[in-house]
Each structure stands twice: as structure tokens, then as C-alpha cells.
């Protein structure tokens, strides 16, 4: 993975390899973790006026191997990074505490942080981590857009996208470009636990709309998105109820 990211700015990890990132406890918890996507809140900030996206959000601090959930706060992107929905503080429903403290999330964050540490000359450092649960739905006569803002960067250092589930949908291809807009790759996350790791400083990404395969049945795409940015505030952590090893 590291060599691919250094060369191309991104790497795709398929389910067979990604399973190795999870502990036995995570595998045992997977069903309940994935089921939490059935209880996401509506995204009411969609500037395109549509209501096909549901989500939850949480912010963490990772420092010295300790992961601490921070008080609930809005998600903000400037219009430099999100031309459609940026420029405002967006308050989403918080991620459920059971999900936030799950072994699955802890293992995925730890695997991504280890990769990022190995790719950066400074190595391990304090990081601000934002976690997003997304469900993009398609109805019988309308597509769902995973990235309605189009090709974009998130304004962070690293982005990890993990497919939780695809049900009765087609398309959803991810396209990667360099910062000059030149296409450098494309892939589709198909199986549960397929994932992509992106260098957000070097590449932009976008996902094609999804549509139902069978118009008579629900269709949706569930993903977990985890972003990593350098933490710029105080980094003192005391291990306690709100902290755990990542």
C-alpha cells in the first residue's frame, strides 16, 4: 500500500486483505457495527434540494496511541473544498456511542494511522480524526449521488473510505485525479470491507451516481469515511473513560 500511495497518491485494498486489519473481536462485532447504518439521520444541508443522503458524524483526537472522542461539534468545509455544501457549519446527528467505542472503528483507525505515520517524514503525531457514516439511497426514478460536489479534496491530510454494504445498486465508481485535474485512476468498491486510502494533499476524488438495479426494491450504498488531519491544539490526554487505545 505505501508504495502505491507514494507513487499514485492512493491505494485500493480489497476485502480479502482488509479483513486482516480487524481483530477477532471486531469480526464478532461486525454485524452490529454495520447494522448501525440503518439508523442514520437525514442530511438537511444538501444544496441541491434533495434528500437521498443520511449520515452521522463524530470527531476524535488521536495522540500517543490514545483515541479520545471530542465533544460533538459541526462539520465544516470551506467552499474551496466543497463548492456545493461548503461555507457553513453543518450539524449532523452524532455517531452512537456504541459505534464510536467499537473494536471495528478502533482497528480501522489504528490501521490507517499506522499507514499515515509511515508515509509522513514526521512519523507519529497528534491527529484530528473525523468519522462519517453515510448512506446514499436511490429511489425508483432518482439516482443517489455519493459526491454531489463532484471531484473534490476534503481539505485534510488523509482520507479512508470503507464500503460497509451495497444493496441493489449499480455504478458508484470512484475516480481519482491529480490536483491539476488529470485522471490517475478509477475503481469501484464492491464487497464489504473494500477500502481506499487517499493522500488528500495530492489527489481529488469523486464517485459516480448510483441507481437501483431492481426498481421495485430499496437500493443504497453505505460507507464509512475517516479523515485525518494534523491536530493544531493542545495534545494532553489522560487515560480515562473517554479515551482508549487505538
Image (cartoon, rainbow, N blue to C red):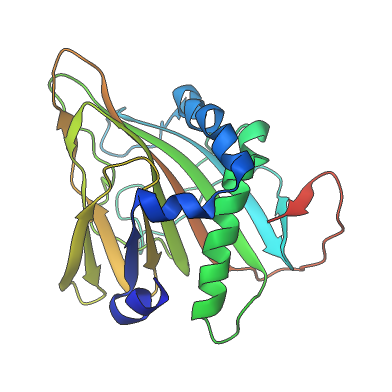
**Residue 53: image location, x then y, percent:** 35, 32
Q: Residue at x 57, y 55 (%)?
A: 109
Asked whether the viewer can see residue 59, the reply is yes
> What is the quadrant of the N terminus in the image?
bottom left
Left or right of residue 188, residue 86 in this image:
right
The residue nearer to you, when weighing 110 against 242, is 110
Q: Residue at x 24, y 39 (%)?
A: 145
Tell me the quarter of the picture where residue 5 sits: bottom left
Left or right of residue 232, residue 115 in this image:
left
Asked whether the viewer can see residue 86, the reply is no
The residue nearer to you, when weighing 124 against 111, is 111
Tell me the quarter of the picture where residue 224 sits: top left
In this view, 121 is above or below 226:
below
**Residue 221: image location, x then y, percent:** 31, 34
**Residue 146: image location, x then y, percent:** 28, 42
Q: Residue at x 30, y 81 (%)?
A: 7
In this view, 51 is above or below 1:
above
> What is the quadrant of the C terminus in the image?
bottom right
Q: Residue furthest bottom?
A: 121
Left or right of residue 188, residue 228 in this image:
right
In this view, 52 is above or below 178:
above
In this view, 156 is above or below 72:
below
The residue nearer to you, when weighing 21 against 47, is 21
**Residue 162: image location, x then y, percent:** 41, 48
Amino acid at each position: 500500500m505505501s508504495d502505491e500511495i507514494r507513487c499514485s497518491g492512493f491505494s485500493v485494498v480489497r476485502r480479502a486483505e482488509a479483513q486482516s486489519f480487524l481483530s477477532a473481536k471486531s469480526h464478532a462485532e461486525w454485524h452490529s457495527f454495520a447494522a448501525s447504518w440503518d439508523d442514520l439521520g437525514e442530511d438537511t444541508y444538501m444544496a441541491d434540494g434533495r434528500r437521498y443522503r443520511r449520515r452521522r458524524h463524530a470527531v476524535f483526537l488521536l495522540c500517543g496511541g490514545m483515541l479520545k472522542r471530542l465533544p460533538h461539534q459541526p462539520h465544516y468545509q470551506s467552499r474551496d473544498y466543497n463548492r456545493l455544501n461548503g461555507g457553513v457549519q453543518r450539524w449532523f446527528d452524532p455517531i452512537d456511542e456504541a459505534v464510536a467505542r467499537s473494536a471495528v472503528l478502533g482497528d480501522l483507525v489504528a490501521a490507517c494511522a499506522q499507514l499515515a505515520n509511515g508515509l509522513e517524514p514526521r512519523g507519529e503525531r497528534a491527529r484530528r480524526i473525523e468519522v462519517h457514516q453515510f448512506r446514499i439511497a436511490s429511489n425508483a426514478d432518482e439516482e443517489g449521488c455519493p459526491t454531489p460536489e463532484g471531484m473534490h479534496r476534503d481539505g485534510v491530510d488523509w482520507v479512508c473510505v470503507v464500503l460497509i454494504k451495497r444493496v441493489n445498486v449499480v455504478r458508484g465508481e470512484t475516480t481519482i485525479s491529480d490536483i491539476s485535474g488529470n485522471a490517475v485512476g478509477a475503481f469501484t468498491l464492491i464487497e464489504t470491507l473494500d477500502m481506499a486510502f487517499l493522500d488528500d494533499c495530492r489527489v481529488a476524488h469523486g464517485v459516480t451516481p448510483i441507481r437501483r438495479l431492481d426498481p421495485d426494491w430499496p437500493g443504497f450504498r453505505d460507507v464509512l469515511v475517516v479523515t485525518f488531519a494534523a491536530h493544531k491544539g493542545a495534545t494532553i490526554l489522560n487515560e480515562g473513560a473517554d479515551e482508549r487505545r487505538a
